[in-house]
Image: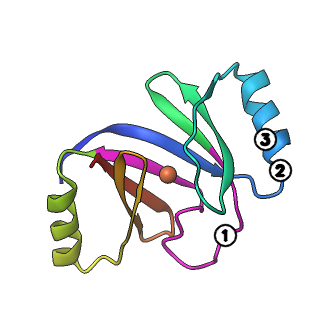
């Protein structure tokens, strides 16, 4: 599948959002960005050049792929083609939508979660 860029990196900071936000905003001087309301998931989005750093304050399920687990997110050229490719390869995925993007989460052979995104 065609990957365009890294869209965001996501850190799980369940129960430690304020300390984590201070860590990244003060040590690295990252600005806070607007964040859409995500039911049941607190957090902060920070700017990192053209990439975002997402701080996610939610309990992880322990199942893979878990959207609130630590992950990196790749912007793909064609998410429908990506989904077809995942199905052909027999890779399990879950889907979501948030604001103006559609999302797919998978996990690599190490249990590292990878998110794919494209505009609606
Ligand atoms: Fe994400």
Q: Which residues are magenta?
A: 55-75
**Magenta region includes residue 57:** yes
First in sequence, mark 2 or 1: give its number: 2
- Height in image: 12 above or below 89? above
Q: Quadrant of the N terminus?
A: bottom left
Q: CA distance from mark 2 to mark 1?
A: 14 Å
- Circle on res. 20: 3
Q: Percent from the top left, x then y, of residue 45?
A: 60, 37
- Asked if marks 2 and 3 touch (Cβ < 8 Å), the reply is yes
1 left or right, relative to 104: left
Q: CA distance from mark 1 to mark 3?
A: 17 Å
- Circle on res. 16: 2
| Label 1: which secondary element | loop
First in sequence, mark 1 or 3: give its number: 3
Q: Residues within 10 Å of mark 3 (few under 14, many from 20)?
A: many
Q: Percent from the top left, x then y, of residue 74?
A: 36, 47
| Label 2: which secondary element | loop
- Height in image: 32 above or below 98? above
Quarter-wise, where is residue 95 in the image?
bottom left
| Label 3: which secondary element | helix
Taking the spot 16% from the left edge, 76% from the top edge, the residue there is 88
Taking the spot 77% from the left edge, 23% from the top edge, the residue there is 27
- Circle on res. 60: 1
**Magenta region includes residue 3:** no
85 left or right, relative to 60: left
Taking the spot 63% from the left edge, 77% from the top edge, the residue there is 62
């Amino acid at each position: 599948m065609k990957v365009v860029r890294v869209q965001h990196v996501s850190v799980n900071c369940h129960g430690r959002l304020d300390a984590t936000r201070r860590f990244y905003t003060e040590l690295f001087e990252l600005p806070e960005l607007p964040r859409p309301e995500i039911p049941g998931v607190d957090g902060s989005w920070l700017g990192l050049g053209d990439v975002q750093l997402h701080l996610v304050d939610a309990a992880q399920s322990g199942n893979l792929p878990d959207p609130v687990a630590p992950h990196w997110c790749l912007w793909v050229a064609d998410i429908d083609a990506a989904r077809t490719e995942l199905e052909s390869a027999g890779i399990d995925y879950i889907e979501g939508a948030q604001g103006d993007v559609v999302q797919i989460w998978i996990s690599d052979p190490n249990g590292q979660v990878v998110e794919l995104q494209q505009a609606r």
